Amino acid sequence: MTADDSFGRLDDDDYPAYTMGRAAAMLGTTQGFLRAIGEARLITPLRSEGGHRRYSRYQLRIAARARELVDQGTPVEAACRIVILEDQLEEAQRINAEYRRAAESANPTTAA
């Protein structure tokens, strides 16, 4: 991979650009919190060739939402489940809207 390829990937939300230490600092949390939400299977960081955890911007947004819930007093496991359910609901609503648009374009209604 060339330097130009690497710079292009920085705009990719799924590119694992952040180390665990940097991710924890950006979120204002501990590395232990990131490990805990990984153990709860909320996010699965990629591993560098040396075995170090690497996080993407998308994963950091998910982790930030979990942290908000934990800061409000929700246990980590419950916060992770809530975030997973929120994500599933958002995806289901997106798919539903796509089906609705497709159905409307296939059967346009005419005003009388």
Image (cartoon, helix red, strand yellow):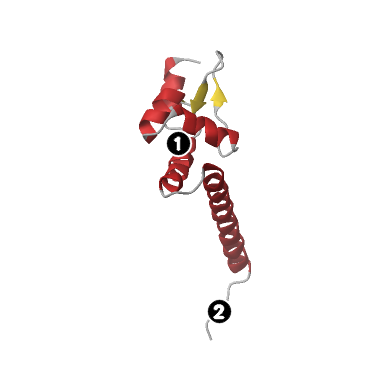
Which quadrant of the figure has residue 26?
top left
Label 1: how many residues lie within 10 Å, few (<14), some (14-19) or many (20+)? some
Residue 94, percent from left and from top = 55, 56
Which quadrant of the figure has residue 107?
bottom right
* Front-lying residue, 94 or 74: 74
Check disc 1 and report the residue beneath it. 60
Q: Amino acid at mark 1?
A: Leu
* Front-lying residue, 6 or 46: 46
Label 2: how many residues lie within 10 Å, few (<14), some (14-19) or many (20+)? few
Q: CA distance from mark 1 to mark 2?
A: 46 Å
Residue 34, percent from left and from top = 49, 32
Q: Find numbered disc 2 in the image and state the secondary structure of the residue it sits on.
A: loop
Whether residue 94 is situated above or below residue 19 in the rendered picture: below
Whether residue 90 is situated above or below residue 105 in the rendered picture: above
Instruction: For residue 100, say whether it is visible.
Output: yes
Whether residue 107 is situated above or below residue 63 in the rendered picture: below
Q: Amino acid at mark 2?
A: Thr
Which quadrant of the figure has residue 46?
top right
Give the numbered dot on residue 110. Answer: 2
Instruction: For residue 19, say whether it is visible.
Output: no
Which marked residue is nearer to the observer: mark 1 or mark 2? Answer: 1
- Residue drawn 54% across the image and 54% down it: 90
- Residue drawn 57% across the image and 56% down it: 89
Q: Is residue 32 left or right of residue 89?
A: left
Q: Earlier in the sequence, mark 1 or mark 2?
A: 1
